[in-house]
Amino acid sequence: MNAAVVEEYGTPRYRAFEEPVAGEGQLVVEVEAAGLNPVDQAKAAGRFYSGRAPLPFVAGGEGAGIVAGGRRVYFDAPVAPFGSMADRSLVNAADAIDVPDGVEPALAVAVGIAGLAAWLPLAWRAQLQPGETVLVLGATGVVGCIAVQAAKLLGAARVVAAGRNEQALARAAALGADATVRLDASEGDDLTAAFREAAGGGVDVVIDPLWGEPAVAALGALGDGGRLIQIGQSAGATATFPSAIVRGKLAEIRGHTNFLAPHDVKVAAYRTLAEHAAAGRITVEIEAAPLSEVATVWERQQAGGHGKKLVLVP
Ligand SMILES: NC(=O)c1ccc[n+]([C@@H]2O[C@H](COP(=O)([O-])OP(=O)(O)OC[C@H]3O[C@@H](n4cnc5c(N)ncnc54)[C@H](OP(=O)(O)O)[C@@H]3O)[C@@H](O)[C@H]2O)c1
């Protein structure tokens, strides 16, 4: 079969790779769509925090496809060295999630890792309550676009979308954000004030895929009992802030990774997301490309896709 193979840490190469063979309790998936996520690039570059995977391996942490019997499934934990960016992949049967009818493979992938990274921080980690205000940092990215829609569906009274790109922020507004804030228009206390003004007061929940300076400004904008859910570091690996920012209002910083969400929580969230997507309540801009073009698509993701979910089709 053909696959996007990481032979040395960096960009994968499209070439032949061994066929997966299902052991006990495993399934071979005929891949119909594979999602490209920042985590795939971190893993392929050998700089993911969980450590370096042995070479060679097939890139791709999530996919949608068909297993024996015609079942259509989504998976996000392929068995190494197999990955989702291949004609076929290998998964543990327990990790295969049924895809609801009416959800095409590319959409099934688009609401996967990115969808869960938007939904679980709000619904599970923050325990968002109806009527609360939500600030979405990085609202111009794929996770951010979904988080804006998810916050509304979960009952947020006011959703503020923050990002650097004007055009992509306009899309966040069209997707339901009540206000937008340009991250590159101000900094420090001024950015904090802009967040508070847009939120109409203290923010209850922040979804933070950025860390760095934007996260510090967002911490400053939290109201009493506010929660910042930390999911990524697109703006910086470190952040420096005075302790009073969190202490003085009983604020909390909670980490989130999809990898550590309990299986039942993840499956329930995925099915909810997929149903919202099938009904058009959650939309994701998708750009699909043939798997053979993986190297080009890899560069596009690195350059910033402004909210377009890049999907590879074997
Ligand atoms: N914890 C988890 O389980 C989990 C799961 C999925 C994703 N994530 C993380 O979430 C983040 C977003 O993922 P994604 O799929 O949405 O990626 P994406 O579509 O590439 O979006 C990246 C976002 O980060 C913004 N950004 C990049 N560099 C920035 C900087 N220096 N300053 C301010 N903003 C910056 C981009 O803004 P522009 O549009 O202006 O470029 C965009 O909004 C990534 O860090 C990813 O690793 C975590």
Image (tube, rainbow, N blue to C red):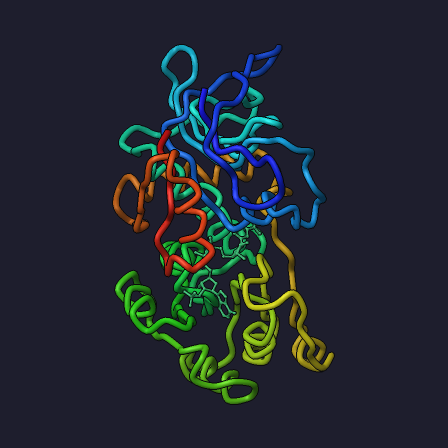
Q: Nearer the viewer, residue 25 or 226?
A: 25
89 relative to 136, above or below: above
- The answer to whether any part of residue 151 appears in the image is no
Task: Give the position of the N terminus as an image quadrant.
Answer: top left
Tell me: 241 left or right of 208: right
Please tell me whether residue 162 is drawn above or below residue 156 in the rendered image.
Answer: below
Q: Position of residue 135 (x, y in %)?
A: 46, 69
Q: Residue at x 54, y 44 (%)?
A: 40
Question: In x, y percent, where is residue 192?
Answer: 52, 83
Q: Quick check: 106 above or below 249?
A: above
Between 240 and 49, the one lying in front of the other is: 49
**Split into 4 quadrants, where in the image is the C terminus?**
top left
Displayed quadrant of residue 149? bottom left
Residue at 32% from the left image edge and 66% from the top image edge:
168
Residue drawn at (38%, 23%), measured in percent from left and top? 72
Tag count: 0
Q: Can residue 210 be seen in this snapshot?
A: yes
Above or below: residue 83 compared with residue 178: above
Left or right: residue 57 versus residue 170 is: right
Image coords of residue 97 (percent x, y): 47, 28
Residue 150: image quadrant is bottom left
x and y percentages locating residue 231 in the rendered image:
58, 57
Hey, which quadrant is residue 237 in on the image? bottom right
